Image (cartoon, rainbow, N blue to C red):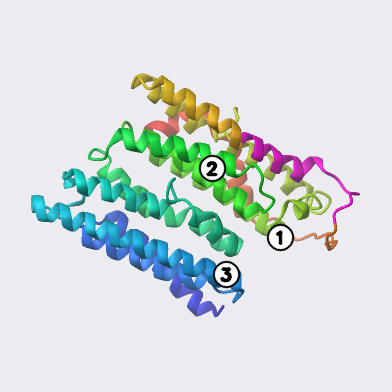
């Protein structure tokens, strides 16, 4: 892709995100989401592969539907209450439609079907944007309207997302699809707590974005898209693979790694809100995710050649690991000891 075009699309992404996150009016928030959608489409379809074109088409149709629902929700609220302010969403029908629209934007169950397919059709770097940056504006709208949304509905959607994200990731061999189902399961954790402690949802999103960025960039560096390819990379970049192993365990939420912090705080808050059954259920469902993270980690570090899979042998490379990956993997594994400092900052 032309560097100038890529620069324009990147600036448009940042602009759309900034407009949505800083707006008070529904029309401005909708405009920011539309700019985001239009800017990411060329980045998804830049490889001109049929799978990439299919992914871009699916993404466009789903996001256009979600944006329409969001606009319809805000217009319904304005019709009944005369308010266009995002924080003044009070009409129950508007709240229900908005929940559906944002769930569709994020890929929450039952509107999750598009996300694994789109991520599978996109390049790894674009997949990183789809899994992190593109989820920030809808999460912000969730944050601003959290006091108006139905907690029971959100809890049901969250538990279903955690269950389905873990269950459907078990049988996958494509790394991007595994990370897509991982994202759906993490969104379940963010959604279950948003009615009770919205700041905790944002903290969870920031830490999830940090760990996902480290994983995607490491995989992009070693050019691994399938588990069979991942099995052969240990001899090529052992230090990067060792850090990828720890980052995957952090994504699974194992102590004493960074990924344990949001899960710990969410379970604590749910228990305070007398929701111990929901906390128990979502904790048990996260074990499904732990299984496929361990499978990925096993393929990353423990499976050494020689083995019998058919693949093109890659040359050993002495290319230095990018400093960004080094910083992100360090943060993804070592932030838990300073958690008393992180939580008040959020």
Q: Looking at the image, which residue is at 85% across and 45% down?
A: 304
In this figure, which residue is indicated by the disc labeled 1?
A: 223
Disc on the earlier residue, 3 or 2: 3
In this figure, which residue is indicated by the disc labeled 3?
A: 52
Residue at mark 3 to residue at mark 1: CA–CA distance: 18 Å
Magenta region, residue range:
290-309
Q: Is residue 13 visible?
A: no
Disc on the earlier residue, 1 or 2: 2
Near mark 1 (Cα within 10 A), the count class, few <14, some 14-19 or many ≥20, is: some
Q: Quadrant of residue 297?
A: top right
Position above or below: 338 against 110? above
Q: Quadrant of residue 76?
A: bottom left
Apparent side of residue 66 relative to residue 130 in the rendered image (left or right): left
In this figure, which residue is indicated by the disc labeled 2?
A: 165
Residue 306 on the magenta segment: yes
Residue at mark 1 to residue at mark 2: CA–CA distance: 24 Å
- Mark nearer the viewer, 3 or 1: 3
Q: Which mark is residue 187?
A: none
**Where is residue 312 shown, x and y percent of the image?**
84, 63
Near mark 3 (Cα within 10 A), the count class, few <14, some 14-19 or many ≥20, is: many
Q: Quadrant of residue 247?
A: top right
**Where is residue 278 shown, x and y percent of the image?**
42, 26
Front-most of residues 176 and 301: 176
Say which element carries label 1. Answer: loop
Q: Looking at the image, which residue is at 66% across and 59% down?
A: 220
Say which element carries label 2. Answer: helix
In the rendered image, the quadrant that contains the C terminus is top left
Disc on the earlier residue, 3 or 1: 3
Near mark 2 (Cα within 10 A), the count class, few <14, some 14-19 or many ≥20, is: many
């Amino acid at each position: 892709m032309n560097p100038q075009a890529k620069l324009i699309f990147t600036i448009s992404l940042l602009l759309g995100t900034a407009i949505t996150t800083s707006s008070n009016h529904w029309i401005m928030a909708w405009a920011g989401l539309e700019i985001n959608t239009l800017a990411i489409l060329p980045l998804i379809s830049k490889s001109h592969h049929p799978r990439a074109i299919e992914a871009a088409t699916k993404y466009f149709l789903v996001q256009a539907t979600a944006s329409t629902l969001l606009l319809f929700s805000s217009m319904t609220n304005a019709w009944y209450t005369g308010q266009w302010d995002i924080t003044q969403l009070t009409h129950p029908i508007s709240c229900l439609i908005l929940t559906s629209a944002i769930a569709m934007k994020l890929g929450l169950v039952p509107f999750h079907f598009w996300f694994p397919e789109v991520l599978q059709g996109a390049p790894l770097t674009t997949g990183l944007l789809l899994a992190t940056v593109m989820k920030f504006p809808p999460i912000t709208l969730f944050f601003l309207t959290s006091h108006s949304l139905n907690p029971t509905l959100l809890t049901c959607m969250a538990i279903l997302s955690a269950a389905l994200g873990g269950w459907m990731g078990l049988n996958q061999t494509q790394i991007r699809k595994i990370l897509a189902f991982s994202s759906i399961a993490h969104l379940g954790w963010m959604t279950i707590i948003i009615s009770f402690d919205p700041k905790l949802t944002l903290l969870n999103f920031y830490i999830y974005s940090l760990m996902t960025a480290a994983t995607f960039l490491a995989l992009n560096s070693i050019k691994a898209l399938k588990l069979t390819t991942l099995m052969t990379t240990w001899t090529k970049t052992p230090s990067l693979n060792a850090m990828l192993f720890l980052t995957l365990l952090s994504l699974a939420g194992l102590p004493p790694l960074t990924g344990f912090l949001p899960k710990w705080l969410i379970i604590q808050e749910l228990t305070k809100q007398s929701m111990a059954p929901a906390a128990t259920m979502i904790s048990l469902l996260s074990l499904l995710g732990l299984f496929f993270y361990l499978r990925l980690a096993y393929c990353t570090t423990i499976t050494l050649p020689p083995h019998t899979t058919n693949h093109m042998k890659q040359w050993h490379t002495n290319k230095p690991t990018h400093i960004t990956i080094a910083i992100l993997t360090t943060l993804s594994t070592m932030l838990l000891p300073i958690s008393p400092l992180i939580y008040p900052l959020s």
